Image (tube, rainbow, N blue to C red):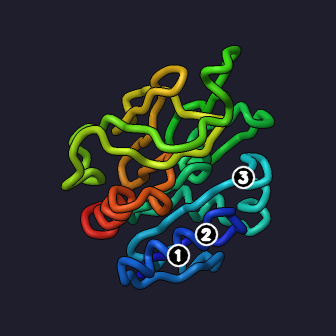
Amino acid sequence: MIAIIDYKAGNTCSVMNALNRLDADYVLTDDKEQIKRADKVIFPGVGHAKAAMDALNEKELIPVIKKLNQPLLGICLGMQLLCAKSEESNTKCLNIIPLDVLRFSSDTSEFKVPHMGWNTFEQNNDLLFNQIGCENHCYFVHSYYAPISEYTISKTNYIHDFSSSIRKNNFVGVQFHPEKSGTIGEQIIKNFLEND
């Protein structure tokens, strides 16, 4: 059973649609015990970092997420919340992956913020990218990013290089939206379900 963490994240329906296409067994839940018992956990997210952390705190889900031992996939804001803190409203995040999430800065018309649309990523040989070749495109919508670090498992360039996915132990996050990224995104979700 896959648990999708329900804290009113903006992309929950599209994640559920992606899992339906893969005929995956899942539940959308904010029940702490159900999340703890799940085989895999998906942590979606679209929105504001502070509002999201406030929602997690209100539902008493922060300690639950931090103690999970099963594979967890954070998507977009869900990935950013795995980090230590975000420049968005100077928000303290879950601090599972010790990175600070920064805001894109651009003073040219060539690069607009937010970074929105299709972009390529360059990945390493992480299991998340099984059967995925080079020069693949995924869909991004974000104004904040995780910098390149030892936790980077794929990178993308927009203004500069940034982490388009990160991993620490059983926690993996993607900045792009695999649920909106066609066959490549579907393969990434499938890899998470089958291999992580």
**Label 3 belongs to which residue?**
47
| Residue 89 visible somewhere in the drawing | yes
- Looking at the picture, how far across and down is residue 131, in whole percent? 19, 55
Q: Decide: marks 1, 2 in contact (CB < 8 A)?
A: yes
Q: Which residue is mark 2?
A: 12
Residue 96 in sight: no
Say if 39 sits above or below 84 in the image: below
> At 60% across and 36% down in the image, what residue appears?
115
List x then y, in percent, for residue 169.
36, 49
Q: Which quadrant: the N terminus?
A: bottom left
Residue type, label 1: Met
Residue at the image point whose x is 63% and y is 79% from the top: 31
Instruction: Assess disc 1: are there few (<14), some (14-19) or many (≥20) residues with their C-alpha within 10 Å of its C-alpha.
Output: some
**In percent of the image, x 77 and y 47: which residue is there?**
50
Q: Nearer the viewer, residue 13 or 169?
A: 13
Q: CA distance from mark 1 to mark 2?
A: 6 Å
